[in-house]
């Protein structure tokens, strides 16, 4: 039997004495597009970092394709961190950043050569920003920064991608480019896990959702799990969010084909 | 060069090598936001120097520098450890370590001065402010070789250092031992600080690391080139400072080296092409001018649509809709506006330009209304930028939208 892409069992993560995630338990089959949804401070990023092995796990375990996380995860795991996590005034060009996606494969001391450069250029092409290759990263707009990060993840050429809020604060054109990329990755059988904030688009983008608020509220296929009741549990009593959630569910189940923000690609 | 004897030459080679190493590790420290840590590190070396002297009773430079390295590293460990176990933040921890270690060092060196008669020759006071002239041949060779080793490590690990500086989380996912690389980088910084002690002294060592890197950063935008330029600046200012100090014996090397590199920094700050103060001021001036010229054209177009082809000078320059003289001159120079007796009017080209600007602005507003969320970096654009950003099919779509909304609009 094929092992799942990601399996998380009884995971608890604590910072100092305070647990920020507890008893998280789910598994994700290969080739699925998964959204992680939950309020601010619910531990979504921490969960992603725990899967990547970036934060210590207090108890439980994480397996990637049936194996514990190894030191050399570059070929299996691709990562798109939050845009704000780096200094965008750093003295590198767009191509330099994308080339970092090839460092894992290159190994110690070896420098990126022509083959890597061409590959990085292809990855930029995949996000429609090949003309920005020699641009200094401080000159990019927010949406362009996000596309550069995605191109770098693409350059990693991984089986499983974890993306921390790729849609946060980007323009509509970038959102479309990212959605197109996600579809392309799914078509190639890659597994993608995305932290997502916009409840309105969840139903459209993801096959499967994890609803998280310090613990796992629900996990499963979007149709079954993304319900008003579950969202109520996830977001607690916050009214404004609730209205938004209700609206999202109504839209998703009512007239899903008619969403303003998601014009069909290729038109 | 007259007066350049063998001894000076030896010292010169040492300080140039040191300057290069300081430029390289200083750049890494700058990018890793550790410039202030370098200062704390330098000050934290002093007790180590004194204790090494008291313990061994030897005045040999390598022994003193080993003591310096150990206490400097202890200082760094405390700086990174305090914020993790207490509520003390990093900046406070740096200030704390700097002050406490330096204070202990000064007290110890005072004690040595009182008890040991030849303390002035023990090389302790020269480590406070630096005195290259006191360096022996062997010391200089050791400093030079160690500097080259530091440069070599950074050269071979530049790709690894780049990823651990820019995005450590991503580097770790790729399988790099980010923490070990970071510690190695810190160790290289500590070694460079210690090597710089005999030349520039405890107090000014940080300047030797920080100033070349900051100056170079003003000129260049690439990681590798930044380190090369900082190395060149560090080497050149180190060498020049040493020569000046050798020529005028009353001047200690440390302050002279720092003064030379500071002058270069001030020149860089003013004249650097993109990040320099002058370039920035010019850029902001031309942005303002463009915006105002755009506004002038819009005002004239609006007047024209109300049948007033010529607008009196006083009206535009008056209080009500004040247009700056500068933008008027610029519009005339670009052939968009002409003087018309007492007033001004749009030329044919200016009319076209104004129409184009208005159209682009309308399109842009329609686009923003239509788009789900706004990229905050994409505001305040002129017509050329807007036309470049919007794809052709989007423009057609928006134009259809606009013309259905405003019947009988122009264009």
Image (cartoon, coloured by chain):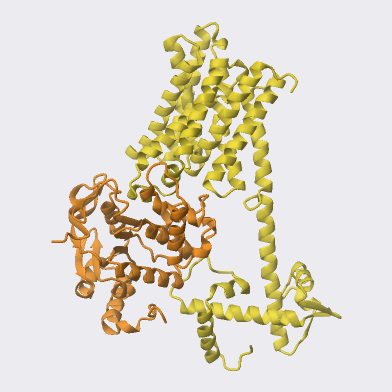
Q: Relative to residue B332, is residue B44 drawn left or right?
A: left
- The answer to whether B306 is drawn above or below residue A40 in the figure is below
* Residue furthest bottom as drawn: B408
* Residue furthest left as drawn: A1
Q: Relative to residue B45, is residue B259 drawn left or right?
A: right
Image coordinates of residue B324 in percent, x first then y, are: 74, 69
- The answer to whether B33 is drawn above or below residue A204 in the figure is above
- Residue in front for this viewpoint, A186 or B103: A186
- Residue in front for this viewpoint, B274 or B41: B274
In this view of the protein, can residue B98 be seen by the observer? Answer: no
Residue drawn where x is 65% and y is 36% of the image: B262
* Residue furthest top as drawn: B117
- Residue in front for this viewpoint, A73 or A227: A73
Residue drawn where x is 40% and y is 52% of the image: A102
Query: In the rendered image, what is the letter of the chain coloured yellow?
Result: B
Image coordinates of residue B327 in percent, x first then y, are: 74, 69
- Residue in front for this viewpoint, A217 or A161: A161
Image coordinates of residue B137 in percent, x first then y, are: 57, 16
Name the quadrant of the C terminus of chain A.
Answer: bottom left
Q: Relative to residue A25, is residue A154 drawn left or right?
A: right
Name the quadrant of the N terminus of chain A.
Answer: bottom left
Residue drawn where x is 58% and y is 17% of the image: B135
Tell me what hue chain A is rendered in.
orange
Q: Quadrant of residue A160?
A: bottom left
- The answer to whether A63 is drawn above or below residue B315 in the figure is above
């Amino acid at each position: 039997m094929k092992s799942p892409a990601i399996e998380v069992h009884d995971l608890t993560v604590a910072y100092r004495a305070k647990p920020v995630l507890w008893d998280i338990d789910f598994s994700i089959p290969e080739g699925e597009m998964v959204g992680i949804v939950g309020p601010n401070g619910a531990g979504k990023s921490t969960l992603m970092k725990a899967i990547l092995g970036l934060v210590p796990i207090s108890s439980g375990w994480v397996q990637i394709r049936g194996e514990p996380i190894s030191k050399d995860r570059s070929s299996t795991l691709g990562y798109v961190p939050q845009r704000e996590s780096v200094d965008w005034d750093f003295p590198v060009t767009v191509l330099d950043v994308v080339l970092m996606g090839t460092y894992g494969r290159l190994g110690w001391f070896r420098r990126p050569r022509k083959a890597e450069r061409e590959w990085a250029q292809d990855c930029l092409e995949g996000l429609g920003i090949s003309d920005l290759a020699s641009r200094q990263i401080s000159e990019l707009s927010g949406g362009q920064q996000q596309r550069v990060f995605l191109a770098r993840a693409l350059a990693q050429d991984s089986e499983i991608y974890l993306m921390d809020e790729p849609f946060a604060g980007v323009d509509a054109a970038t959102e479309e480019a990212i959605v197109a990329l996600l579809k392309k990755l799914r078509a190639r059988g890659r597994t993608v896990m995305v932290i997502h904030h916009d409840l309105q688009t969840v139903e459209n983008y993801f096959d499967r959702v994890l609803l998280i608020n310090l613990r796992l509220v629900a996990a499963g296929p979007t149709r079954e799990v993304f319900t008003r009741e579950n969202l109520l549990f996830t977001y607690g009593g916050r009214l404004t969010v609730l209205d938004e959630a209700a609206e999202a569910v109504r839209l998703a189940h009512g007239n899903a084909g008619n969403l303003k923000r998601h014009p069909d690609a290729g038109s | 060069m007259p007066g350049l004897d063998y001894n000076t030459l030896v010292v010169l080679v040492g300080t140039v090598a040191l300057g290069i190493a300081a430029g390289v590790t200083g750049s890494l420290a700058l990018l890793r936001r550790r410039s202030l840590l370098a200062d704390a590190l330098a000050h934290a070396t002093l007790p180590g120097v004194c204790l090494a002297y008291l313990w061994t009773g030897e005045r040999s430079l390598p022994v003193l520098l080993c003591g310096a390295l150990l206490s400097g590293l202890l200082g760094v460990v405390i700086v990174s450890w305090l914020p993790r176990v207490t509520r003390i933040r990093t900046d406070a921890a740096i200030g704390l370590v700097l002050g406490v270690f330096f204070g202990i060092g000064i007290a110890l060196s005072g004690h040595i001065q009182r008890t040991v008669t030849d303390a002035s020759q023990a090389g302790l006071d020269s480590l406070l402010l630096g005195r290259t002239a006191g360096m022996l041949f062997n010391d200089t060779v050791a400093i030079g070789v160690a500097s080259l080793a530091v440069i070599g490590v950074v050269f071979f690990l530049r790709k690894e250092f780049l990823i651990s500086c820019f995005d450590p989380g991503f580097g770790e996912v790729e399988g790099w031992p980010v923490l070990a690389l970071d510690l190695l980088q810190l160790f290289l910084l500590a070694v460079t600080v210690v090597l710089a002690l005999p030349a520039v002294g405890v107090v000014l060592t940080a300047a030797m690391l920080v100033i070349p890197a900051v100056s170079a950063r003003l000129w260049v935008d690439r990681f590798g080139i930044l380190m090369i330029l900082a190395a060149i600046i560090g080497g050149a200012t180190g060498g020049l400072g040493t020569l000046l100090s050798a020529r005028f014996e009353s001047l200690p090397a440390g302050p002279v080296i720092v003064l030379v590199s500071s002058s270069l920094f001030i020149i860089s700050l003013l004249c650097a092409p993109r990040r320099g103060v002058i370039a920035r001021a010019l850029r902001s001036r031309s942005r303002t001018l463009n915006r105002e010229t755009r506004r002038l054209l819009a005002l004239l177009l609006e007047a024209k649509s109300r049948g007033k082809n010529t607008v009196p000078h006083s009206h535009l320059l008056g209080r009500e809709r004040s247009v700056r003289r500068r933008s008027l001159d610029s519009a005339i120079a670009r052939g968009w506006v002409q003087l018309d007796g007492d007033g001004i009017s749009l030329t044919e080209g200016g009319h076209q330009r104004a129409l184009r600007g208005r159209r682009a602005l309308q399109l842009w507003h329609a686009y923003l209304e239509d788009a789900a969320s706004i990229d905050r970096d994409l505001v305040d654009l002129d017509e050329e930028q807007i036309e470049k950003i919007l794809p052709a099919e989007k423009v057609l779509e928006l134009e259809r939208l606009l013309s259905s909304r405003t019947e009988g609009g122009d264009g």
